[in-house]
Amino acid sequence: MQTAEPTGRFLIRRAGASDADELARFAARTFSEAFGAENTPEDLALYLARAYGPAQQGAELRDPAWTTLLAEEGTTLAGYAQIRTGPAPSCVTGQAPIELFRFYVDSPWQGQGLARRLMAAVDEEAISRGARTLWLGVWERNARGQAFYRKCGFVDVGEKSFLVGTDHQRDRVMARALNSSDAAPPQRSQR
Ligand SMILES: CC(C)(COP(=O)(O)OP(=O)(O)OC[C@H]1O[C@@H](n2cnc3c(N)ncnc32)[C@H](O)[C@@H]1OP(=O)(O)O)[C@@H](O)C(=O)NCCC(=O)NCCS
């Protein structure tokens, strides 16, 4: 994706350094809304302090191993995705893996088809970086996330741990092959 690309009423574009503050606020809020109720306030606070903030997101946005995509409706941020190169767990056996590290759609836009559009943009970006396999970790208790990823063709290939504050949680690891035909899958759930 070389330039901002209109996809229906949404615009999906690569984030730049100037997006760090808004991304940090959005990412912390959407994480809290998705998972806050199922974690203790102490663990949540520890995790938020470590994972989100203008400095942290600024560093991610400057890191060439990462790409962050923002989905906007007008001037409103509606979702974001981050992919990054790095080591994959041994259960990910596909060639040239890249990690889908964060993938969030704000609640007003959930169930609206934005997530599929954002995933298609992730595929396009990952393929342009030379990746052949997209993998991710999703909390074993995140049934909606797993259902969405299965709809996108991911299969469960194993597990890994993920630390939220002091809580060692178990993530399912899911993966699928990337190719140009996967980048625009049939939009069964577009509504
Ligand atoms: C995960 C996420 C991106 C998916 O986007 P979405 O717009 O909600 O996705 P969709 O509505 O297209 O698909 C979700 C599927 O889960 C199903 N679902 C909804 N609630 C569910 C639940 N509690 N348990 C199981 N499945 C559920 C939906 O019915 C839908 O399947 P269907 O289209 O066959 O009916 C979005 O929900 C989100 O951002 N959630 C919070 C953050 C998050 O969990 N991110 C992933 C972290 S790894």
Image (cartoon, rainbow, N blue to C red):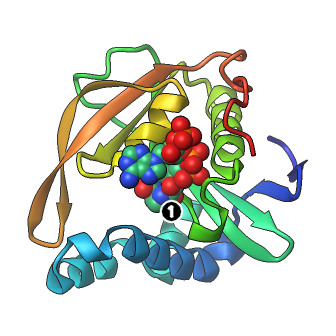
Residue at the spot x=18%, y=40% of the render?
A: 160
Residue at the spot x=71%, y=17% of the render?
A: 180
97 in relation to 49, above or below: above
Which quarter of the rendered picture does the N terminus lie within?
top right
Left or right: residue 8 versus residue 41 is: right
Question: Where residue 76 sits: x, y (%)?
Answer: 76, 76
Residue at the spot x=48%, y=72% of the render?
A: 30
Left or right: residue 137 versus residue 105 is: left
27 in relation to 152, above or below: below
Residue 138 at least partly seen: yes
Left or right: residue 35 versus residue 96 is: left
Residue at the spot x=69%, y=36% of the render?
A: 120
15 in relation to 175, above or below: below
Question: Where residue 43 sits: x, y (%)?
Answer: 17, 77
The answer to which of 61 and 113 lies nearer the viewer is 113
Residue 85 at least partly seen: no
In this figure, what is the number of numbered marks? 1
- Please tell me how crowded label 1 is: few (under 14), some (14-19), or many (20+) other residues with Cα within 10 Å: some
Residue 157 position by quadrant = top left
Residue 94 position by quadrant = top left
173 in relation to 56, above or below: above
Residue 159 position by quadrant = top left
Residue indicated by mark 1: 60
The amino acid at mark 1 is Glu
Q: Is mark 1 within 8 Å of ligand 1?
A: no
Q: Secondary structure at mark 1?
A: helix
Question: Where residue 179 sits: x, y (%)?
Answer: 64, 16
